[in-house]
Image (cartoon, rainbow, N blue to C red):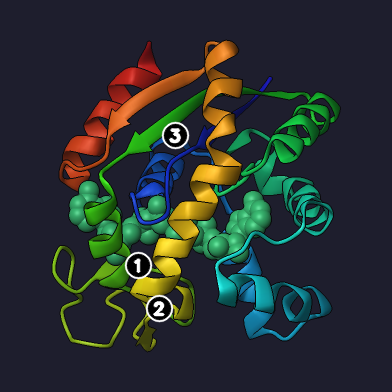
């Protein structure tokens, strides 16, 4: 059975950072809905044109659009053994559809790490985030600066700050998260899948906590 791990937690808490490490360590694909939307926006696809106004405002993209995008992504061969899902599902409808999709793909949600931190921490992390144009490698101006300002260590491409990481929009995204995504914590808690992780610790400690909880 293929293994799927759903990363839950508010914007800026460190889901993407940890999802990449887990994907490498556990040899699973990393599927980030936000990265997929940003790639489509960069390539000016129809999906990108549709999604852009939602991302700019900090609103969720409609479920049907998001679900179709993820369904296509999960069909790719690198997801055969499973994936770390980063940013999807984000609504109860998406979670229900995920169950159906995984039944079709002979997989299941094995665990749901729920990473938390206080709102001040989230705003500080998101507003200091720098992302690489080429592949979405992520840095932080204070906590994880690149060797050379503005340049990605991994591929030399330009770093930029996300439009939706402005303090105003981050605050809005946190509100959207509480309204629309928080119900998933109860949804997965009832299924016995939630693993609570203290996200305010350093990256390495968060990873250790995740790996030791996932082993159980
Ligand atoms: P999310 O995917 O939840 O929005 P990211 O993983 O992109 O969060 O992290 C947001 C920002 O915070 C990035 O700039 C990242 O480098 C930084 N970051 C991630 N985890 C930590 C941590 N444990 N301590 C300090 N900074 C972190
Ligand atoms: P973060 O990691 O900081 O929480 P993401 O990169 O995951 O941010 O998401 C950025 C934006 O992409 C969201 O504000 C939303 O507009 C859109 N998005 C990402 N995932 C989903 C989803 N599952 N459903 C709807 N919209 C989404």
Give 167 or 195, whichever is nearer the viewer: 167
In the image, residue 45 above or below residue 94: below
In the image, residue 107 above or below residue 50: above
Which quadrant of the picture is home to ligand 2? bottom right
Residue that label 3 marks: 26
Residue that label 1 marks: 138
Earlier in the chain: of badge 1 and badge 3, it is 3
Element type where label 1 sits in the image = strand
In the image, residue 44 above or below residue 170: below
Locate residue 77 relative to residue 159 in the image: left or right.
Answer: right
Locate residue 42 relative to residue 72 in the image: left or right.
Answer: left
Query: Is disc 2 surrounded by few (<14), some (14 to 19) or many (20+) residues within 10 Å?
Result: many
The percent position of residue 134, horizontal first and vertical second, equals 49, 80
The answer to whether marks 1 and 3 mark residues whose Cβ atoms lie closer than 8 Å is: no
The answer to whether marks 2 and 1 mark residues whose Cβ atoms lie closer than 8 Å is: yes
Query: Is disc 3 surrounded by few (<14), some (14 to 19) or many (20+) residues within 10 Å?
Result: some
Locate residue 95 relative to residue 171 in the image: left or right.
Answer: right
Earlier in the chain: of badge 2 and badge 1, it is 2
Residue that label 2 marks: 132
In the image, residue 144 above or below residue 56: above
Q: Residue at x 60, y 71 (%)?
A: 55
How far is disc 1 from disc 3 in space, using C-alphas?
A: 20 Å
Element type where label 2 sits in the image = strand
Earlier in the chain: of badge 3 and badge 2, it is 3
Give 104 or 69, whichever is nearer the viewer: 69
How far is disc 3 from disc 2 in space, using C-alphas?
A: 24 Å
Q: Is residue 16 visible to the viewer in this orientation of the structure?
A: no
């Amino acid at each position: 059975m293929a293994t799927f791990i759903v990363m839950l937690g508010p914007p800026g808490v460190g889901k993407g950072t940890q999802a990449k490490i887990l994907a490498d360590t556990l040899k699973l694909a990393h599927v980030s809905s936000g990265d997929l939307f940003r790639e489509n926006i960069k390539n000016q696809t129809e999906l990108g044109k549709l999604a852009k106004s939602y991302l700019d405002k900090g609103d969720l993209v409609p479920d049907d659009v998001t679900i179709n995008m993820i369904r296509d992504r999960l069909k790719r061969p690198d997801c055969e053994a499973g994936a770390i899902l980063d940013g999807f599902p984000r609504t109860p409808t998406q979670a229900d559809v995920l169950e159906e999709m995984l039944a079709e793909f002979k997989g299941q949600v094995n665990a749901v790490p729920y990473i938390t931190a206080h709102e001040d921490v989230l705003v500080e992390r998101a507003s200091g985030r720098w992302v690489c144009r080429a592949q979405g490698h992520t840095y932080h101006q204070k906590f994880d600066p690149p060797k050379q300002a503005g340049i990605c260590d991994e591929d030399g491409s330009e770093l930029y700050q996300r439009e939706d990481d402005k303090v105003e929009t981050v605050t809005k995204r946190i509100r959207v998260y509480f309204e629309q995504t928080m119900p998933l914590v109860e949804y997965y808690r009832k299924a016995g899948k939630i693993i609570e992780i203290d996200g305010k610790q350093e990256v390495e400690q968060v990873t250790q906590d995740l790996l030791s909880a996932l082993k159980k």
